Protein backbone atom coordinates (compact mmCIF):
# COMPACT_ATOMS: atom_id res chain seq x y z
CA UNK A 1 0.00 0.00 0.00
CA UNK A 2 1.31 3.42 -0.94
CA UNK A 3 -0.39 6.57 0.33
CA UNK A 4 0.39 9.43 -2.02
CA UNK A 5 -1.47 12.30 -0.35
CA UNK A 6 -3.38 13.15 2.82
CA UNK A 7 -5.35 16.40 3.06
CA UNK A 8 -6.03 18.49 6.16
CA UNK A 9 -9.29 16.66 6.84
CA UNK A 10 -7.57 13.25 6.88
CA UNK A 11 -8.78 12.14 3.43
CA UNK A 12 -6.11 10.16 1.61
CA UNK A 13 -5.50 8.50 -1.75
CA UNK A 14 -2.96 6.04 -3.02
CA UNK A 15 -2.48 2.63 -4.55
CA UNK A 16 -2.41 -0.98 -3.43
CA UNK A 17 -0.38 -3.75 -5.00
CA UNK A 18 -1.45 -7.11 -3.64
CA UNK A 19 0.45 -10.38 -3.83
CA UNK A 20 -2.67 -12.55 -3.59
CA UNK A 21 -5.74 -13.04 -5.74
CA UNK A 22 -8.53 -15.54 -6.18
CA UNK A 23 -8.60 -14.98 -9.95
CA UNK A 24 -6.32 -16.12 -12.74
CA UNK A 25 -6.04 -12.50 -13.94
CA UNK A 26 -2.72 -10.70 -13.88
CA UNK A 27 -2.38 -8.69 -10.65
CA UNK A 28 -2.32 -4.95 -11.30
CA UNK A 29 -1.82 -1.88 -9.15
CA UNK A 30 -5.22 -0.80 -7.79
CA UNK A 31 -6.42 2.59 -6.53
CA UNK A 32 -7.32 3.19 -2.90
CA UNK A 33 -9.04 6.03 -1.10
CA UNK A 34 -9.92 6.54 2.52
CA UNK A 35 -9.91 8.73 5.56
CA UNK A 36 -8.45 8.80 9.02
CA UNK A 37 -10.18 10.17 12.09
CA UNK A 38 -8.59 13.44 13.12
CA UNK A 39 -10.14 14.02 16.51
CA UNK A 40 -8.74 16.21 19.29
CA UNK A 41 -9.52 13.33 21.69
CA UNK A 42 -7.12 10.94 19.93
CA UNK A 43 -3.50 10.88 21.00
CA UNK A 44 -1.80 10.29 17.63
CA UNK A 45 -3.02 6.74 17.01
CA UNK A 46 -5.90 7.41 14.58
CA UNK A 47 -8.67 5.12 13.43
CA UNK A 48 -9.16 4.94 9.69
CA UNK A 49 -10.91 3.25 6.79
CA UNK A 50 -10.09 2.83 3.12
CA UNK A 51 -11.43 1.14 0.03
CA UNK A 52 -9.49 -0.66 -2.70
CA UNK A 53 -11.16 -0.99 -6.09
CA UNK A 54 -9.31 -3.95 -7.62
CA UNK A 55 -8.21 -3.05 -11.16
CA UNK A 56 -7.88 -6.67 -12.27
CA UNK A 57 -11.04 -8.27 -10.88
CA UNK A 58 -14.72 -7.63 -10.26
CA UNK A 59 -14.32 -7.10 -6.53
CA UNK A 60 -13.78 -4.36 -3.97
CA UNK A 61 -12.35 -4.44 -0.45
CA UNK A 62 -13.00 -2.16 2.50
CA UNK A 63 -10.49 -1.97 5.34
CA UNK A 64 -10.95 -0.43 8.78
CA UNK A 65 -8.50 -0.25 11.62
CA UNK A 66 -6.19 1.79 13.77
CA UNK A 67 -2.61 3.00 13.62
CA UNK A 68 -0.54 2.16 16.68
CA UNK A 69 2.96 3.21 17.70
CA UNK A 70 4.74 0.60 19.81
CA UNK A 71 7.18 1.23 22.67
CA UNK A 72 10.06 1.36 20.14
CA UNK A 73 8.38 4.01 17.97
CA UNK A 74 7.43 1.54 15.21
CA UNK A 75 4.14 2.30 13.42
CA UNK A 76 1.73 -0.58 12.90
CA UNK A 77 -1.60 -0.43 11.05
CA UNK A 78 -3.93 -3.16 12.30
CA UNK A 79 -6.89 -3.74 9.99
CA UNK A 80 -9.91 -5.92 9.40
CA UNK A 81 -11.29 -6.19 5.86
CA UNK A 82 -14.32 -7.30 3.89
CA UNK A 83 -13.85 -8.30 0.25
CA UNK A 84 -16.95 -8.41 -1.91
CA UNK A 85 -16.83 -10.26 -5.22
CA UNK A 86 -19.42 -10.09 -7.97
CA UNK A 87 -21.75 -13.11 -8.27
CA UNK A 88 -24.30 -13.80 -10.98
CA UNK A 89 -27.27 -14.71 -8.81
CA UNK A 90 -28.66 -14.24 -5.33
CA UNK A 91 -28.28 -18.00 -4.80
CA UNK A 92 -24.49 -17.49 -4.71
CA UNK A 93 -24.59 -14.45 -2.44
CA UNK A 94 -23.43 -16.50 0.55
CA UNK A 95 -19.97 -16.97 -0.96
CA UNK A 96 -19.46 -13.43 -2.28
CA UNK A 97 -18.04 -11.80 0.86
CA UNK A 98 -14.80 -12.73 2.60
CA UNK A 99 -13.38 -11.34 5.83
CA UNK A 100 -9.84 -11.17 7.12
CA UNK A 101 -7.17 -9.18 8.89
CA UNK A 102 -3.96 -7.48 7.78
CA UNK A 103 -1.17 -5.84 9.72
CA UNK A 104 0.86 -3.21 7.86
CA UNK A 105 4.22 -1.68 8.80
CA UNK A 106 5.93 1.32 7.27
CA UNK A 107 8.76 0.68 4.81
CA UNK A 108 11.53 3.17 4.21
CA UNK A 109 11.16 5.21 1.03
CA UNK A 110 12.84 3.68 -2.03
CA UNK A 111 13.76 7.12 -3.41
Image (cartoon, helix red, strand yellow):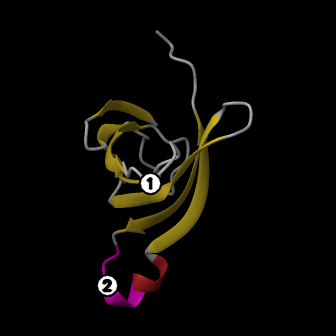
Towards the viewer: 17 or 40: 40
Towards the viewer: 45 or 87: 45
Q: Tell me the SS state at disc 1.
A: loop
Q: Residue furthest front?
A: 41
Category of crowding for the residue at label 2, using alpha-carbon neighbours closer than 10 angstroms: few (below 14), some (14–19), many (at least 20): few
Going 25% across and 37% down the picture, which residue do you hit? 8
**In the rendered image of this protein, does residue 26 appear above or below residue 41?**
above
Q: Is residue 90 visible?
A: yes
Magenta extent: 87-92
Q: Residue furthest top?
A: 111
Picture coordinates of residue 40, whole percent (x, y): 39, 50
Towards the viewer: 40 or 28: 40
Going 45% across and 73% down the picture, which residue do you hit? 97
Task: Residue 81: say if magenta.
Answer: no
Category of crowding for the residue at label 1, using alpha-carbon neighbours closer than 10 angstroms: few (below 14), some (14–19), many (at least 20): few
Picture coordinates of residue 65, whole percent (x, y): 51, 56
Q: Tell me the SS state at disc 2.
A: loop
Q: List the residue tagged with mark 1.
A: 41
Q: List the residue tagged with mark 2.
A: 89
Picture coordinates of residue 88, whole percent (x, y): 31, 78
Amino acid sequence: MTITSVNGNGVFIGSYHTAVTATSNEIKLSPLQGSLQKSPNQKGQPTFGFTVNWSFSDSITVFTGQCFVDEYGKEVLKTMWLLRSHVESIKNDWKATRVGINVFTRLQSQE
